[in-house]
Amino acid sequence: MTASLQSHSHGQTMVLTISNPQHRNALGPEIYAAGVEALNVAENNPDVRSVVITGEGSHFCAGGNLGRLLANRQQPPEVQAQSIEGLHNWIETIRAFPKPVVAAVEGSCAGAGFSLALACDMVVGAHNAVFVMAYSSVGLSPDGGGSWSLMRALPRATAMQLMLCGERVSAERLQALGVITQVTAAAEALPEALRLCERLNARAPNALASIKELVNDAVTESLNTQLRAERDHFVRNLHHANAGEGIAAFLDKRPAQYR
């Protein structure tokens, strides 16, 4: 069975499901390309206000397919470099996507699967989820932005421990460290992620897009530059129709209806 990325709608949320269950939803170039395409289409679709990424069955994603990686050792280095570029295109697309992206994680979340979850804006992990930067266990180093994400989320010593030792980490520990958003019961990660998205979908899309852009830029920009960006986003959003609706709804003590 060929690995694929399945897509379906749940209200205003697009659900992307990594489908490669015989290999614990291991990733491959066809999934990367489908992920980029799906987000590019969703960006221009006003009916889609959020995205959930999850895995088919009882696992989120075991990372790269080791059989494919072993075969690529017999190919020129450019073959693997091109494959990683495909993954990185997807990661960058998720980060730049102007709508919230939530990972719903059950079971294994390893290697590039962990990097993929970290690229999302929020992560809902089940009690049975196991997160591991597995690269060093097979003589490899991180890809998919895993080192970038962990070094911004954690103290250096903790990030290094996860990457150097390849330790298995529970959802509860990652929540305590501030890496993931919330922990839920087994088999409830996707339903809980969808409930979270319903809350996000009720908010002004333009405001959420501004927040995501500001947060992405905040780690590299100076305070002065960030303050200017906040000013510009605030003024632009104030003059958007959604601000008029939001302020009026608050004063009228009624739910806002954002477009």
Image (spheres, helix red, strand yellow):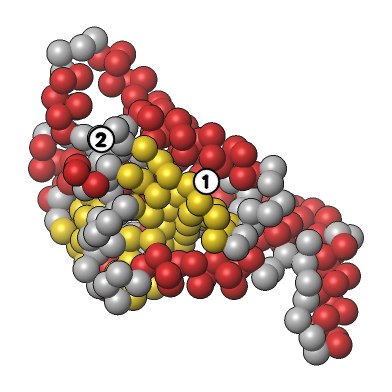
Judge from the rendering whether residue 112 lies leftward or rightward of residue 36; answer left or right: left
Mark 1 or 2, nearer chain start: 2
In the rendered view, would you say 131 is above or below 78? below
Residue 224 in view here: no
Q: Position of residue 205 (x, y in %)?
A: 70, 59
Q: Position of residue 45 (x, y in %)?
A: 68, 46
Please tell me in which quadrant of the rendered image residue 253 appears: bottom right
Please tell me in which quadrant of the rendered image residue 211 appears: bottom right
Q: Which residue is mark 2?
A: 1
In the rendered view, would you say 196 is above or below 65? below
> Could you say which disc has been placed on residue 167 in the image?
none
The residue lying furthest to the top in this view is: 76
Q: Which residue is mark 1?
A: 95
Q: Between 229 and 125, which is closer to the camera in this rendering?
A: 125
Q: Between 40 and 208, which is closer to the camera in this rendering?
A: 40
Judge from the rendering whether residue 18 lies leftward or rightward of residue 50; answer left or right: left
SS class of the residue under badge 1?
helix
SS class of the residue under badge 2?
loop
Q: Which quadrant would the C terminus be assigned to in this image? A: bottom right
Q: Residue at x 51, y 35 (%)?
A: 36
Label 2 neighbour load within 10 Å: few <14, some 14-19, many 20+: few
Q: Position of residue 246 (x, y in %)?
A: 81, 74
The residue lying furthest to the bottom in this view is: 253
The amino acid type, in three-letter code, at marker 1 is: Arg
Q: Between 21 and 228, which is closer to the camera in this rendering?
A: 21
Q: Residue at x 67, y 70 (%)?
A: 202
Label 1 neighbour load within 10 Å: few <14, some 14-19, many 20+: some
Residue 233 in view here: yes
The amino acid type, in three-letter code, at marker 2 is: Met
Please name which of the two marks, 1 or 2, marks the residue nearer to the observer.
2
